[in-house]
């Protein structure tokens, strides 16, 4: 991951990897995955700074990350080989 995305996007609720995939139609999800931001902001630009949001009552990023870790076969393989 590059530094601007790590700095500005990784904990923003509008960064597509942080959005719940099951909430979108397949075509919409593909479109979102091609972007840095659901609002087409660029990391750190004035729109990003105005829209950036790191928490939301509808999206719990920590819970999503925990679910992702549990469902990640690579994580399961690491657990099973220890």
Image (cartoon, rainbow, N blue to C red):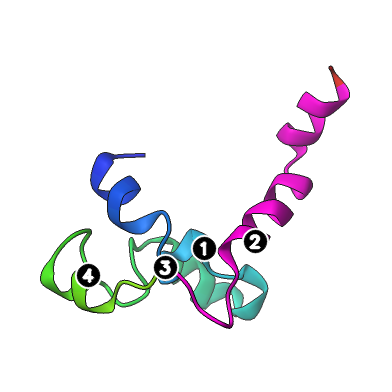
Kindly check if marks 3 and 2 are in contact, taking CB atoms under 8 A apart as contact.
no
On the image, numbered disc 4 is attached to which residue?
48
What is the x, y in percent for residue 40? 27, 72
What is the x, y in percent for residue 63? 67, 62
Say few, some or many: other residues with alpha carbon within 10 Å of mark 4 (under 14 / 14 to 19 / 20 or more).
some
The CA span between labels 4 and 3 is 12 Å
The CA span between labels 1 and 2 is 8 Å
- The residue most toward the top is 82
> Measuring 53% from the left and 69% from the top, which residue is drawn there?
19
Q: Which residues are magenta?
A: 55-80
Earlier-in-chain disc, 4 versus 2: 4
The CA span between labels 4 and 2 is 22 Å
In the drawing, does residue 21 fall left or right of residue 52? right
Kindly check if marks 1 and 2 are in contact, taking CB atoms under 8 A apart as contact.
yes
On the image, numbered disc 3 is attached to which residue?
54
> Measuring 49% from the left and 66% from the top, which residue is drawn there?
30
What element does badge 2 sit on? helix
């Amino acid at each position: 991951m590059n530094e601007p995305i790590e700095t500005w996007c990784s904990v923003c609720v509008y960064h597509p990897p942080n959005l719940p995939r099951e909430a979108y139609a397949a075509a919409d999800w593909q479109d979102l995955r091609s972007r840095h931001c659901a609002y087409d902001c660029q990391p750190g630009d004035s729109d990003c700074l105005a829209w950036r949001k790191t928490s939301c009552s509808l999206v719990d990023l920590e819970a999503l990350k925990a679910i992702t870790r549990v469902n990640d076969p690579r994580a399961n393989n690491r657990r099973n080989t220890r």
